[in-house]
Every structure is written in structure tokens, then in C-alpha cells.
Amino acid sequence: AQKITQTQPGMFVQEKEAVTLDCTYDTSDPSYGLFWYKQPSSGEMIFLIYQGSYDQQNATEGRYSLNFQKARKSANLVISASQLGDSAMYFCAMSPISSGSARQLTFGSGTQLTVLP
Amino acid sequence: ETGVTQTPRHLVMGMTNKKSLKCEQHLGHNAMYWYKQSAKKPLELMFVYNFKEQTENNSVPSRFSPECPNSSHLFLHLHTLQPEDSALYLCASSQDRQGHEKLFFGSGTQLSVL
């Protein structure tokens, strides 16, 4: 069984500053992937960044980076230079890496980020 | 535009009604999913289809009936729903290959059951 924990129900950040959204996970799978999704008020879930459990380096995608600490089972999302458009719900998710079956993501409860002007 | 289209965007229905949610993906993916997002709860996986075959049914009540006629289309047929079924229903698709694989989501159908 997998479990994702996001302990921050809400976060505020000043525009142009960096913010870290926390995510811890629990799994017995030896190989897994970690994902972050953004959900604006429109409802659509937008993929942001991916980290494989065997990746040596932390993933980065533009202003998004994933602070992956395998021993601590944490996969925090760092957003640099926050913009007003970053205000949204952010979900951490994970999935085992296995062959022959469609991916199944387990999601956390989310963090509502509000960027202040 | 993510390539996954859901209709309708909003739906209000009574407990005795029958309605269907539609999802269409234009990405050439072979796996499609239904997720339920209730207020203050994590997303819950409902059904998974891989190459049109249902591979997962996460103990979903029979009042929800999925249909996948081909790899591009997915339906969720609803009948005799309960008020607690009110939620955002999200459709997603993926390529279903090993390694890095991400889900592409639609904008969802906001369902209200009266």
C-alpha cells in the first residue's frame, strides 16, 4: 500500500519569492515515481514535475524543482520566483513502476498555495 | 489544452435520474482513468482501462458504470446516485509504458446530486 502525506493545507507566499511545499510518502515498492500536479480553480490537473526513485539527481522543470530525499521519504516541491498565476491547489502523488499495467497514482490531500501581490 | 476533453463541465441531477459523463482523449494514449475528487479528500481512483479492457475497479458502487468503446473514449454512466456522490469527476489518460509516465487530465465534470 502507498500513502502520500501533505501536512500543509494552506500556504502563502509573496510574489517573486520561493516557496517549498512538503510531501512525504510511504511505500513498500522498490521502484516508484513521484509526481507533482497543480490544480487551478478551473479544475484541470496539470502535471508539473516527475522524480524516479532511482534518479540520481533532483528533477527540475523551469521554476519547479523537486527536493528528493529518499532516506527521509520526502519529495518536496520548490517553486522559485512565485507568480500570481501560481495560486492553485498542489498535489503530490506517487505510483509504483511496474510492467504490464496502467499507472495508478496515489494522491495526497493537497496544499492550497496563495501568492500575494 | 491537454488533449483530454470532458463533457459536460457541470451536471445537476436528481437521485432517480440517469446521466452519462463523457471523456475523449486526442493524445493516442492507450490507458484511461476515472477519478473522483470530493471536497477535502484526496483524489480517489475509480476505474482504469488499458487497451479498452477494464483493469481496475476500486470497489466502486454499481450505480457507477464505466464504458470504454475504444482507446479514445471513456464514459461513466450514472444512475440512482446519492447526494454523497456529488464531487468533481476527473478523466485522465496515459501512454502506459514503463518508466516515466504521466497522466493527462481533463477539466472534470462537477456533479451535484440533489
Image: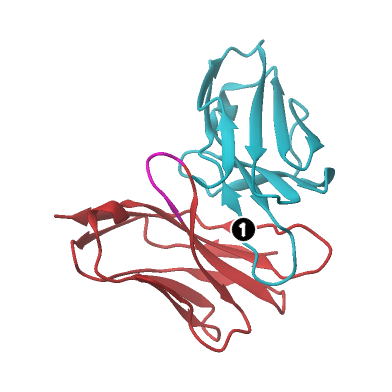
Q: Which residues are magenta?
A: A38-43
Q: Quadrant of residue A10?
A: bottom left
**Is residue B90 placed above or below A54 in the rendered structure?**
above
User: For chain A, what colour was chosen?
Assistant: red
Q: Main secondary structure of the magenta part?
A: loop
Residue projecting furthest to the left: A117
Q: Quadrant of the N terminus of chain A?
A: bottom right
Q: Position of residue B114 (x, y in %)?
A: 53, 15
Q: Position of residue A50 (x, y in %)?
A: 54, 70
* Residue A39 located within the stretch drawn in magenta: yes
In the drawing, does residue B39 fall left or right of residue B106? left
Q: Residue at x 65, y 42 (%)?
A: B25
Q: Please tell me which residue lies in front, A58 or A11.
A: A58
Q: Quadrant of residue A100?
A: bottom right
Chain coloured cyan here: B
Residue A3's place in the image compared with B81, above or below, is below
| Chain letter belonging to callout 1 | A
Residue B97, image x and y in percent? 75, 65
Circle 1 is placed at which residue position?
A: A106
Which is more toward the observer, A101 or A92? A101
**In percent of the image, x 80 and y 38: which residue is there?**
B70
The residue at 49%/49% (across/down) is: A45
Residue A38 appears at what percent x and percent y? 43, 54
Taking the view exactly as shown, the residue that stands out farthest to the bottom is A56
The total of numbered circles placed on residues is 1
Q: Callout 1 environment at 10 Å: few (<14), some (14 to 19), or many (20+)?
A: many
* Residue B94 relative to residue A49: left or right: right
Residue at 76% over, 51% down: B30
Q: Is residue A107 above or below residue B7?
A: below
Q: Is residue B68 magenta?
A: no
